[in-house]
Image (cartoon, rainbow, N blue to C red):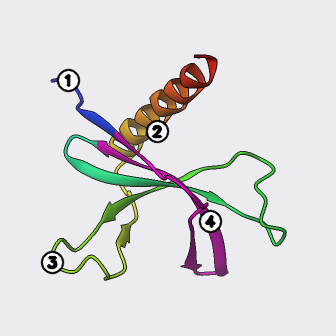
Amino acid sequence: MADENKYEEIQGEEMTVTLELDDGSVDCAVVTIITVEDKDYIALMPLDENGENEDGEVWFYGYKENPDDPNEEPELIYIEDDAEYEKVEEAFDEYLDNCEFDELI
């Protein structure tokens, strides 16, 4: 079964979200939203206190918006399944490859 991957570019100003974790809160830059096998996922880059990401680390979460209320905060869902996480990681790598290719044109 072929994966149906869709990429949604985040246009304009850099978007950020604040995640509340067990050891405190972390501000993250939103990189993109990826659709893999009809599920949406969000790629986030954790930012340090200076608003930078020096190590290139990216976190992936399931992403769900309420279609009935576009003003409601989206839900981020922790990905527990390793196989699902790997599919999202592969789709993100493909997204990055496409971004690099687009920069060359």
Residue at image mark 1: 2
- Tag 1 secondary structure: loop
The residue where tag 2 is placed is 89
* Residue at numbered disc 3: 68
**Label 2 or label 1, whichever comes before in sequence order:** 1
Task: Specify the amino acid type for callout 1.
Answer: Ala
State the predominant SS element of the stretch in magenta. strand
Residue 28: say if magenta.
yes
Question: Mark 2: few, some, or many residues within 10 Å (few <14, many ≥20)?
Answer: some
Q: Whole-Å distance between the Cαs marked 2 and 1? A: 16 Å
Report the Cα–Cα distance between label 1 and label 3. Answer: 30 Å
Do labels 1 and 4 touch, CB within 8 Å? no
Q: Residue at 31% across / 82% down in the picture? A: 72
Which of the marked residues, 2 or 3, is nearer the chain's N terminus?
Answer: 3
Instruction: Name the quadrant of the N terminus.
Output: top left
Residue 89 spot, x, y in % from top left: 46, 38
Q: Residues within 10 Å of mark 3 (few under 14, many from 20)?
A: few
Q: What are the residue bounds of the magenta stretch?
A: 7-35
Count every numbered label the image shows and give the total.
4
Q: Measured from the top left, where is residue 105 in percent x and y?
A: 58, 16
Residue ID for mark 4: 28
